[in-house]
């Protein structure tokens, strides 16, 4: 009788719970539009400067689902968002539009940017500063360290962080371009046999003495190609010439200074020809515009 009473009480409780229709809600009330918040100056700036003219959206609000769950990352500070995006527009977007036209950037510019405040640290001791995924999405890291001339606390050494950010953007956009139309196979033969998975144990100076513009360029030919694009644009023609002229000692692989310089000149010529022949872009003009825009931010 005791067991029967307990069973009856449990059954009554279950029936009562099932009859509480007001707790279930209505499926039509579920918001399927994603994150919502009251839009402010940042959102309006993004809409007017990037989304309306170029169909580019930016996610700056924290969303771990957009990131690697195995990394410890922090969101960007909101006071950094407009200065960062404004600089990106001036240095990268506007200059490509000036040289290649708005249609070019509408077609090939990534449509979705995700902004992160901190760096993404890898297990091998390296740092990921940015990634491009499928030509549609770019993640940018270390934005909380961004400061340009006129911002509180700016010091000349902050220019390194500014150049590093644009190096990342130009690098990733270079990938988008060559994944759309591949560069000539002859480029891969310039440094054949010298690519290495141990590039992170090589300094930029040592890499240059073996004919690579940076140590990361030694990782594989695709990275070599886009590192050349990025460094030539960000450093400008004068800065690139200084790098070439600074090679005075043999490289770790036995490359002579003359051989290293010749390899970098070959790579330079192939990058310039690729931009001209494939995209109709005068690379040296784009280079001059890009470096002038960077100088305006840091000098």
Image (cartoon, rainbow, N blue to C red):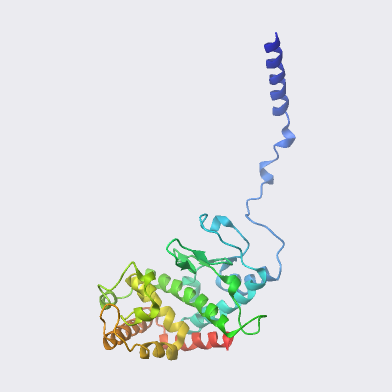
Residue 181 visible somewhere in the drawing: no
Which quarter of the rendered picture does the C terminus lie within? bottom right
Please state which of residues 201 and 3 is positioned toward the viewer in this rendering. 201
Q: Is residue 296 visible?
A: yes
Compared with residue 277, is residue 127 higher up or lower down, i.e. above or below?
above
Residue 7: x and y in percent read 68, 16
Name the one closer to the observer, 71 or 13: 71
Residue positioned 72% across, 20% down in the render: 12
Name above or below for residue 174 compared with residue 297: above
Q: Nearer the viewer, residue 142 or 98?
A: 142
What residue lies at 54% left-to-right and 84% top-to-bottom? Answer: 294
- Residue 208: quadrant of the picture: bottom left
Labels in figure, total: 0
The N terminus: image quadrant: top right
Q: Determine whether, in the image, residue 59 is placed left or right of residue 204.
A: right
Quadrant in which residue 65 is drawn:
bottom right
Q: In the figure, is residue 128 to the left or right of 220?
A: right
Q: Residue 297 vs residue 277: left or right?
A: right
x then y, percent, for residue 16: 73, 25
**Image x and y of residue 230, in percent:** 43, 78
Q: How far across and down, in percent of the image, does residue 45 sit? A: 66, 73
Compared with residue 256, is residue 13 higher up or lower down, i.e. above or below?
above
Q: Please tell me which residue is depicted at 35% across the width and 84% down the height of the picture.
A: 268
> Of all residues shown, which one is farthest toward the top?
1
């Amino acid at each position: 009788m005791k067991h029967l009473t307990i069973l009856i009480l449990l059954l009554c409780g279950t029936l009562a719970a099932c009859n509480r229709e007001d707790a279930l809600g209505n499926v039509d009330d579920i918001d399927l539009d994603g994150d919502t918040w009251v839009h402010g100056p940042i959102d309006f700036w993004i809409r007017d400067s990037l989304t309306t003219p170029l169909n580019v959206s930016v996610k700056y609000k924290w969303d771990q689902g957009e990131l690697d769950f195995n990394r410890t990352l922090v969101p960007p500070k909101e006071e950094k968002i407009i200065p960062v995006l404004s600089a990106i527009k001036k240095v990268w977007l506007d200059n490509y539009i000036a040289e290649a036209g708005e249609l070019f950037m509408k077609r090939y510019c990534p449509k979705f940017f995700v902004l992160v405040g901190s760096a993404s640290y890898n297990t091998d001791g390296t740092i990921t500063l940015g990634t491009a995924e499928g030509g549609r999405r770019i993640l940018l890291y270390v934005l909380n360290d961004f400061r340009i001339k006129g911002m509180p606390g700016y010091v000349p050494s902050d220019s390194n962080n500014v150049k590093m950010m644009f190096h990342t953007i130009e690098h990733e956009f270079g990938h988008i371009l060559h994944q759309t139309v591949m560069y000539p196979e002859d480029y891969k033969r310039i440094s054949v046999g010298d690519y290495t998975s141990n590039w992170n144990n090589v300094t930029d100076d040592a890499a240059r003495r073996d004919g690579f513009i940076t140590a990361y360029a030694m990782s594989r030919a695709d990275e070599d190609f886009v590192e050349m694009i990025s460094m030539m644009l960000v450093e400008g023609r004068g800065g690139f010439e200084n790098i070439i002229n600074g090679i005075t000692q043999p490289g770790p692989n036995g490359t002579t200074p003359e051989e290293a310089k010749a390899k970098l000149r070959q790579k330079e010529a192939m990058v310039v020809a690729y931009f001209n022949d494939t995209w109709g872009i005068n690379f040296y003009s784009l280079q001059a515009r890009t470096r002038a825009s960077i100088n305006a931010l840091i000098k």
